[in-house]
Image (tube, helix red, strand yellow):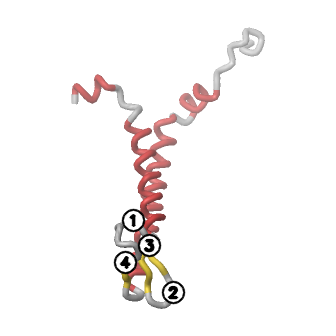
Amino acid sequence: RMIRDDALPDIREVIVSDLDLRDLVRNQVLDCVDDVKAELAYQVKIYESGSVSSGTGTGTGTGSVSGGDACDFEELRNVLLRAQGQCDIWFGFIAEEDVRDA
C-alpha cells in the first residue's frame, strides 16, 4: 500500500525510527574515544621506549625517538579532531530551547 501511495519513508526516517540516529552517533563518539585512548597509549609506549627529541619545535610535528621509532602526534591530533566532530554532531541533536532551559 505504501508503494502505491508513493509514501515510502526516506533513509533518515528509517534510521531514526529503527536505530535512533542519536544512538548511532553516540556509538561513534565512544568508538572515537576508544581510538584516542589506544593512540595515546601507543604514543606513551613509543615515548617511554627511548629519549624523544623535538622535531620541528612547533609542538605539532613529530619527535624522533632513538632507535628509529617516532612519536606521531599528528595522528593523535587527527583522532581527537574526529572525536570532537562526532561530539559536535551529537550535541547538535539537543534543541536550543533545552539548552537555554538547562
Write down the residue under mark 3: 62
Q: Could you tell me how far apart the alpha carbons at marks 3 and 1 are, in whole angstroms?
A: 7 Å
The residue at which mark 1 appears reads as 60
Labels 2 and 3 touching (C-beta < 8 A): no
**Distance CA(mark 4)–CA(mark 1):** 10 Å
Q: Which residue is painted at 44% across and 49% down in the image?
A: 29
Distance from Cα at disc 2 to Cα at disc 4: 14 Å
Task: Check if mark 4's residue and mark 3's residue have beta carbons within 8 Å.
Answer: no
Disc 4 and disc 1 in contact, CB within 8 angstroms: no
Judging from the image, what secondary structure is the residue with disc 1 in? Answer: loop
Residue identifier under label 2: 68
Q: Earlier in the sequence, mark 2 or mark 4?
A: 4
Residue at 22% in and 30% down: 102
Name the residue type under label 2: Gly
- Quick one: label 4 or label 1, which is nearer the N terminus? 4
Image quadrant for the N terminus? top right
> Residue 13 appears in which quarter of the rendering?
top right
Instruction: Judge depth for marks 2 and 4 and give the one in front.
Output: 4
For mark 4, what is the residue? Answer: 54
Could you say which is closer to the camera, residue 55 or residue 39? Answer: 55
Q: Residue furthest top?
A: 5
